[in-house]
Image (cartoon, grey):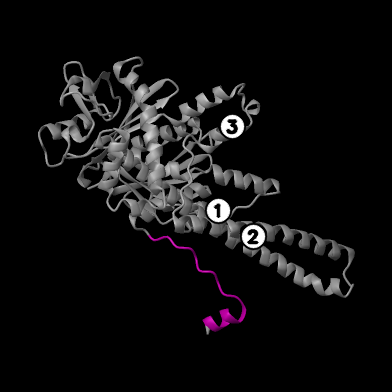
Amino acid sequence: MPKRTITVETRLQCNTELTNYLNSTVSVYEQVKRSIWHEMTDKNYDKKYAKESEFTKHCRNKYNLHSRAINSIIHEVKGTMHSYMELKKTELANVTNKITSQQGRVDKTIKCLDKLKPKVTDNKATDKELDKYRKYKQRLYYQKNRLNRLKIKKQNLEYVIEHKIYSLCFGSKQMFRKQYNLFANNYKTYTKWHNDFVKNRDKNILFLGAYNETLGNQMINLSYNEDTDIFNIKIRKIEKTNNKKGSADNYVLGDSIKFSYHKDDIIKLLNEHLSNNKNKQSITYRFHKENTKWYMQIIFDLYFESTSYITRCNNGVIGLDYNDGFIQLAETDKCGNLVNLQKYNLQYHGTGNKAKTEIEQTISNIVKYAQSVGKDIAYENLNFKSTKSQQIKATSKNGKQYNRMLHQFDYSRYKQKLQDISFNNQVFIYYVNPKNTSKIGKEKYANRMKLTTHQSAAFVIARRYQGFKDKLKPIPLKGKENLKQVS
């Protein structure tokens, strides 16, 4: 059964009982999280606590918090630890690729030097050859230095991964280092920097979901009022109190909460818990602070049957070719013939908010068109991690332009948004092997059908999903090998 993890966000009203409680609690929550982080990343953690339940009991007594709140903090810390190690593994893979690429450059330079070395040794080299030899020697020096630095970095990463050494700055290193140069970072006093650093550090509270708990969460109960069409929330305070069990002083109430998206799905989740349905699931809540405003996020899994897709590939497919600055669409019929072409321009680049909004709107338009014609979407499954990791600092204008284009080519976000928006609109998408799509399109369809390279590539992508096999022409053999083949 297809599923996607959905995160729905809404802004909370300011100066309410709920936001006032969050403002007073976030520093306590974050302080406990940092302390638990240091304990869990300690080398002797496994020796001290044989079971996680023992560590949970230790934290409950030490920090005077509910065990349910401690569970949420431990879960968040474990997720951060896992993400940290995965990031280091990715860095190690990138460094390994860079070492391979750099070693190839060193070998190439050495070959060039070996060709010139006999003439230089015998004092028979021309001025031009001697000048070239000296440039190669200088280039080799800097290339070997870079190669050595990469090898040292690889050794350090391997040591960190092997011994599970965690080094993390809560609040970001960039913000932390600003204290060493206050005036350059527009700070007149240390106190002003410290206040901003604390705001940047203490801004998240997570309440972990549990499917067997009331309304899917250990600490929060969310309810829907049909008469007012709003949601109400009831939060258990994370601190232990001497009040009686069930006392109103143990809880914080919030009302007038509205959701613009997935409201029906949230109501369905709550009704499944109220009716004790077998399909009930956990609901995780995260509160996030930006400046003085608080936002509440609901995180849950959304399922639907495979037969619920409203698009098919029987009558044709929509192929997408993603490029720097535009998305090319090509639509086919059931026989694999081209019936429509559409180009969607992308003005903004990089990872800014304008680029994010633009790519969302563009993909939304493409998905709506797929809905209207009832056709599946095919796209290429590309991965640029290895290519990006092998890039070096360019000196020429074309090289700088290519590096800039490659690193601003945000294919991962395009792919993620295409999957999310298609899932929400019940449009089926399928990724095809990207091998030689542009070459095949240019060779087989571009000239014959008066198409551009990208139009023909999108056409090949659509046909490949439909099962049509487009191949490159075999390269003819030359000379004696050709004669042997003919005979």
Horizontal placement of 138 versus 361: left or right?
A: right
Q: Residue at x 50, y 40 (%)?
A: 326
Considering only vertical position in the picture, is 253 above or below 85?
A: above
Estimate the spatial distance between the alpha carbons at disc 2 and disc 1, rounded to whole Å: 17 Å
Q: Position of residue 140 (x, y in %)?
A: 73, 62
Q: Where is residue 267 in the image (x, y as percent from the top left)?
A: 19, 29
Kind of residue sitting beneath label 3: Lys
What is the span of residues highlighted in magenta in the rendered image? 469-486
Helix, strand or loop at mark 1: helix
In front here: 317 or 394? Answer: 394
The answer to which quarter of the image holds residue 129 is: bottom right
Front: mark 2 or 1: 2
Kind of residue sitting beneath label 1: Ser
Q: Can you identify the residue that label 3 sits on?
A: 178
Horizontal placement of 198 versus 13: left or right?
A: right
Instruction: Kindly tell me whether residue 54 is visible in this rendering.
Output: yes
Q: Can you identify the residue that label 2 sits on?
A: 148
Q: Can you identify the residue that label 1 sits on?
A: 389
Mark with earlier residue (2, 1): 2
